[in-house]
Image (tube, rainbow, N blue to C red):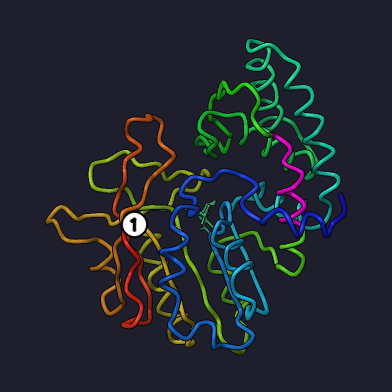
Amino acid sequence: MTKNDHKKTVIAKPFVKWAGGKGNLLNILESQLPDDFDLQKNVTYIEPFVGGGAMLFHMLKTHKNIGRVVINDINKDLIRCYLLVKENPQKLIELLTFFEQKYYQLSEVAKKTYFYEVRNEYNNMDLDDDHRAAHLIFLNQTCFNGLYRENANGGFNVPFGCYKTPKICNIDVIMADHEALTNVEICCGDYKSVFQQLSIGYNFIYFDPPYRPLLGSGNFKQYSKSDFGDGEQVELKRFCDKLTARNCKLMLSNSDSINEDGTSYFENLYNGYFFNKVLAPRFINAYAEKREKQIEILITNYDNPNKPLPLIL
Ligand SMILES: C[S@@+](CC[C@H](N)C(=O)[O-])C[C@H]1O[C@@H](n2cnc3c(N)ncnc32)[C@H](O)[C@@H]1O
């Protein structure tokens, strides 16, 4: 199959499953872009907490007026994966094919043993960048519920997933993503560093930071050993003010977290911004029966009076 065949048949989409992935909220996020988004020329699109990149791939596909794209995440190994998909997809395919062929030949008991061997290598061995990226994708596809979580020491600690033939090497997706990422600038670090990346013209920034837990729940929010607590949520709001002062358009999603007095944490924090609430399915939870729909808040620094929300999921 040639590069162009991939372009025709397979749509770029996340190559990892990621906690908080936005795959099921894309039509809602799309509906909340600024009214005049498609009228802008040469938009710079920035995603400072890119994770699995569901919104990134959607934007790349849907809005041809985007001239420049910058993505960032603090998770070094995740960014190594993006870089490898962009720069050397054949190497990634080679490494993942090895994992897949080996894994499929093993009995269920041996699969489990192999998973923990690879996890141990990932956590304790000095792997080069390419192998670290391939290890992450293998673990992501074979671990329980396909999520990424680190313990306090920064070790990947998700248990074995017990799936018979998980897709470990999805060549079509890797090649479609490779093409989509051709001109994407990929950064690794704290989200604030994207301030240096602003363009002179129209900048649109979509923030999908770690969720603040809903009151009293044990919601998942640990993507890396650095926790994202209330101090960080307040700092992020200040950063949004700074971007607003620079005339950037921004949208931010989070859980609709409730204060002890029953008021909305984010409506208080983002006083003066605009809000919409949607019911979103949460797919990654240790207990399947707790995978219920939860209210997610969308915050923008622009009003969209002509764009009502589509029907809630
Ligand atoms: C909710 S996830 C993003 C989900 C993503 N939009 C998707 O569709 O899959 C949050 C991401 O923020 C990253 N992160 C956490 N703290 C960060 C920081 N200080 N700066 C940049 N990224 C950070 C995590 O590594 C994680 O990938």
Residue 286 at x, y = what percent? Answer: 41, 31
- Residue 219's place in the image compared with 29, above or below, is above
User: SS for tag 1?
Assistant: helix
- Neighbor class of circle 1 (other Cα within 10 Å; few <14, some 14-19, many 20+) is few
**Residue at 58%, 34% in the rendered image:** 156
Horizontal relation, residue 311 to residue 30: left or right: left
- Residue 302's place in the image compared with 104, above or below, is below
Residue 265 at x, y = what percent? Answer: 25, 61
Residue position marked by numbered label 1 in the rendering: 230
Instruction: Decide which of 48, 88 is in the foreground and name it.
Output: 88
**Residue at 77%, 61% in the rendered image:** 179
Query: Could you say which quadrant of the image residue 191 lies in?
Result: bottom right
Q: Specify the amino acid type for callout 1.
A: Asp
Question: Can you say which quadrant of the picture contains the C terminus?
Answer: bottom left
Query: Could you say which quadrant of the image residue 125 lies in?
Result: top right
**Residue at 64%, 21% in the rendered image:** 116
Looking at the rendering, the stretch of residues picked out in magenta corresponds to 168-178
- Residue 102's place in the image compared with 185, above or below, is above
Instruction: Decide which of 277, 8 is in the foreground and name it.
Output: 8
Tell me which secondary structure the magenta stretch mostly adopts.
helix
Horizontal relation, residue 86 to residue 25: left or right: right
CB of mark 1 near ligand 1 (< 8 Å): no
